[in-house]
């Protein structure tokens, strides 16, 4: 057990941005707010047989990478955990986390470590979900993120990772909701910023009154906001008034415009997304005569740019609704004749089913946090037993974009040790500065 007067030396950061130390007994101590190289005393909040969880109460030796957080709500708001850590050190830590995961979980070492993809550290968050609470005891409405390790909404009037125009709306949104008839039945506001318009999605548990609808219209006119309403699940989202520009983002390098709904999954960081798509396609190296498969294609974020380079692209996603939207986006961009989209549960796929999609020269894989285990396993099974699909030929190159280094490492182990690939390159992507979230990209080539 860690003694109250014991000084601990912080050795590293874990994937939750907690400092990692060992006490005098050798037990691991996870320390909220501590940085590598620091010497701290702590208050233990939780004890288990093999580890303890604690917070810093005193600091004897400070890290040279410790900085003053830019947001005055840091420590209360749960939206960011690493603002006290220099952003360059954050990126280096994420790169090490990727390399450690690849080696320790997948026994894979990339032949080349790619330079991390970085972008703006502030004002980058173009997607967010803000909680709304009418707090009777405080006599006011709160709009913002949850407090750290709490279900309460933080009392915040600004946010440094939101674009400045959205940060400036937090207080006006409080006032708007406070004056609405349904203020106790409005649990959240979802934010989505496009290239030409900012959309806010109001979740409402009861039908909106005419007075509240007019208040929304007046607010939208004053602050240049496009309102959407969500009475139930995400499929019920609709515009309050069908006027004004369409919500969309662009990929200028490829001449692509991507219309989307504010509740669709799109990357929160548009600047990084543009760089990531460009880097991924450069690593993929699709040629005009080649056929490419984009697994977990979403709305076509990678599919459509690839279609500007390859002969044909097959996009595969788990939802019929997403596939329909991808087809629409291909039409918008004049790429319908070079793209095909199929709905398929990619968490359950056999080697024979994989082979049925035909040979593709290259793959782009961009799965959710669960990774692409079934896909990698099917490819490994085909390599182990060619008789399962005698005419199948595996892709020569795979670019894997990941939002979870653990599942990437697991899948990389299958690709390298069973499917006959080399991991020729891997690098971190700082999609979410000041958070512990690690995005990455890895490139695999057939032996």
Image (cartoon, rainbow, N blue to C red):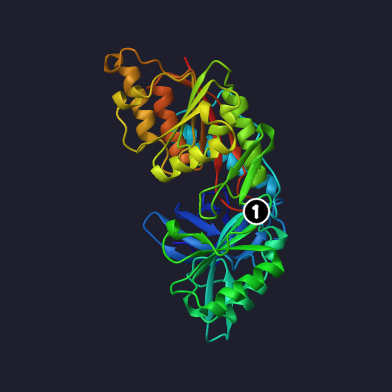
Residue beneath the point at 69% across and 55% down = 123
Q: Is residue 35 left or right of residue 354?
A: right
Q: Residue 215 in the image: x percent, y percent?
A: 61, 76
Residue 347 occupies quadrant: top left
Q: Is residue 387 left or right of residue 68?
A: left
Dot 1: few (<14), some (14–19), or many (≥20) neighbours within 10 Å?
few
Quadrant the N terminus occupies: bottom left
Q: Residue 233 in the image: x percent, y percent?
A: 41, 60
Depth check, front residue: 102 or 221 = 221
Query: What is the secondary structure assignment of the residue under circle 1?
Result: loop
The residue at the far left in this view is 387
Q: Is residue 205 above or below residue 401?
A: below
Q: Residue 24 in the image: x percent, y percent?
A: 49, 55
Depth check, front residue: 91 or 184 = 184
Residue beneath the point at 59% across and 42% down = 258
Q: Is residue 351 left or right of residue 106?
A: left
Q: Residue 33 in the image: x percent, y percent?
A: 59, 60
Residue beneath the point at 72% across and 60% down = 164
Q: Is residue 382 above or below residue 134?
A: above
Can residue 117 be seen in this snapshot?
no
Depth check, front residue: 53 or 363 = 363
The residue where tag 1 is placed is: 245
């Amino acid at each position: 057990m860690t003694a109250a007067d014991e000084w601990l030396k912080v050795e590293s950061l874990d994937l939750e941005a907690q400092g990692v130390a060992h006490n005098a007994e050798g037990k691991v101590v996870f320390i909220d707010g501590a940085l590598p190289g620091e010497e701290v005393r702590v208050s233990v909040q939780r004890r288990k047989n093999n580890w303890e969880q604690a917070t810093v109460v005193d600091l004897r030796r400070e890290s040279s990478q410790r900085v003053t957080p830019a947001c005055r709500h840091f420590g209360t708001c749960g939206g960011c955990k690493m603002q006290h850590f220099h952003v360059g050190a954050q990126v280096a830590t994420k790169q090490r986390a990727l390399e450690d995961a690849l080696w320790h979980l997948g026994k894979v070492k990339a032949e080349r470590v790619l330079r991390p993809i970085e972008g703006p550290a502030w004002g980058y968050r173009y997607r967010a979900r803000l909680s709304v609470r009418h707090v009777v005891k405080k006599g006011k409405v709160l709009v913002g993120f949850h407090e750290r390790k709490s279900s309460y909404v933080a009392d915040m009037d600004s946010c440094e990772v939101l674009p400045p125009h959205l940060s400036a709306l937090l207080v006006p949104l409080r006032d708007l909701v406070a004056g609405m008839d349904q203020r106790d039945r409005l649990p959240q506001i979802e934010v989505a910023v496009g290239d030409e318009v900012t959309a806010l999605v109001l979740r409402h548990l009861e039908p909106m009154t005419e007075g509240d609808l007019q208040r929304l219209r007046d607010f939208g006119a004053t602050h240049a906001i496009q309102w959407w309403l969500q009475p139930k699940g995400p499929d019920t989202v609709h515009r309050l008034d069908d006027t004004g520009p369409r919500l969309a983002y662009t990929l200028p390098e490829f001449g692509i415009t991507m219309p989307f709904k504010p509740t669709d999954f799109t990357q929160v960081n548009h600047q990084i997304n543009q760089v990531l798509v460009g880097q991924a396609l450069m690593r993929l190296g699709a040629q005009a005569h080649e056929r490419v498969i984009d697994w977990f294609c979403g709305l076509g974020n990678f599919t459509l740019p690839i279609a500007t380079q390859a002969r044909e692209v097959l996009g595969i996603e788990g939802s019929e609704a997403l596939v329909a939207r991808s087809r629409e986006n291909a039409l918008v961009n004049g790429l319908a004749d070079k793209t095909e989209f199929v709905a398929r549960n990619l968490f359950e796929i056999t080697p024979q089913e994989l082979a049925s999609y035909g040979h593709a020269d290259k793959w782009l894989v961009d799965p959710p946090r669960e990774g692409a285990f079934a896909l990698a396993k099917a490819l490994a099974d085909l390599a182990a037993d060619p008789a399962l699909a005698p005419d199948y030929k595996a892709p020569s190159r795979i670019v894997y974009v990941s939002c979870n280094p653990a599942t990437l490492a697991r899948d990389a182990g299958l690709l390298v040790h069973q499917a006959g690939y080399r991991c020729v390159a891997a690098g971190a992507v700082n999609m979410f500065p000041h958070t512990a979230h690690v995005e990455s990209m890895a490139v695999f080539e057939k032996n």
